[in-house]
Amino acid sequence: MTKRVAILISGGGSNMVALAKSMTGDHPARPCVVVSNVPHVKGLERAEVLGIPAVCVDHRPFGADRAAFERALHETVEGYAPDIICLAGFMRILTGAFVGKWAGRMLNIHPSLLPNYKGLNTHARAIEAGDAEAGCTVHEVTPELDDGPILGQARVPIIPGDTPETLAARILPLEHQLYPEVLHRFASGDRTPMLLS
Ligand code: GAR
C-alpha cells in the first residue's frame, strides 16, 4: 500500500521539494501534507505550487509552552494520516513526547556527518576543526537531538578557502539526492544504511 508522507519544514523547503518530486511513478510513497512552524515561508508556497496541502502551525503563540505546541503540531499532522514524517529543515527541537508518538516512522536530514556536529552551525564547526570531509546525514529521529540510527550519508571534501557558505552550497545538492534515496528505501521497508556515491 502506498505510504503517506508528511514533510515538516521551517524555511525555504528545498529538501521538501526534492522529496515531493521524487514521490512519483512506482515510488512506494506520496506526500500528504507540508507543515511549517514558521508562517509565510517560501517552502509553503512551493508546496502549494506542487499541489500539496500546505499548513502552518506557528510555534510563537505557544511561547515557552513547548508541550502545547507539540500537541497542536501532532493533531494537525495526524489529521493527514501520514505513515512517515520527514523533517526537512525543521528547526524546532521536538521533545520525547512528540517523537515517541512517531517512533520508527520519523526521519531527519542533518547537514553534518553525524555523530559529528549535532545542533547548529555544522559547516563552520567542521571547517574550524580542520576536518578533511563534511557532508550530510539522514537518520531516524529519536528523543536525543540529531541522534538515532543513521540511514544514509553523503560526503564531500573540505577544500582550502572553504567558508560555511561555500561548503553549504556544495552539500545542499547532495542532500537533495540523499534524502529521496533514503526515503524510497525506508518506505520500501529497507533501513540498511547507505553511502551516496
Ligand atoms: C538543510 O541544509 C538541512 O540539512 C538543514 O537545514 C537546511 C534546510 O534547507 N537542517 C538542519 O540544520 C536541521 N538541524 P531547506 O529548507 O532548503 O531544505
Image (cartoon, rainbow, N blue to C red):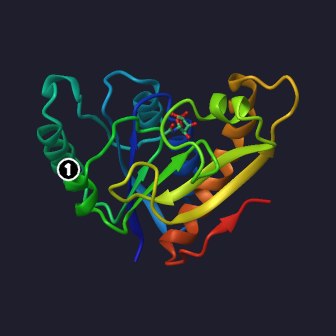
The quadrant where residue 133 appears? top right
Going by the image, does 178 lie left or right of 93?
right
Total marks placed: 1
Q: Is residue 46 above or below residue 188?
A: above
Task: Identify the residue at image location x=49%, y=66%.
Answer: 149
Residue 104 in which image quadrant: bottom left
Asked if residue 31 can be seen in this view, the reply is yes
The crowding category of the residue bearing disc 1, from other C-alpha atoms within 10 Å (few below 14, some 14 to 19, many at least 20), is some
Q: Which residue is mark 1?
A: 74
* Left or right: residue 71 compared with residue 105: left
Q: Residue 25's spot in the image, x, y percent?
A: 58, 65
Front residue of 184/122: it is 122
Indicate whether 128 appears above or below 6.
above
- Confirm if mark 1 falls within 8 A of ligand 1: no
Which quarter of the picture shows residue 158?
Answer: top right
For the C terminus, the quadrant is: bottom right
Compared to residue 131, the image places residue 61 above or below, namely: above
Camera sees residue 26: no
169 sits left or right of 45 in the view? right
Which residue is at a point 25% across and 50% down the rendered structure image?
A: 77
What's the residue type where badge 1 is placed?
Answer: His
- Pinpoint residue 14: horizontal percent, then vertical percent: 56, 36
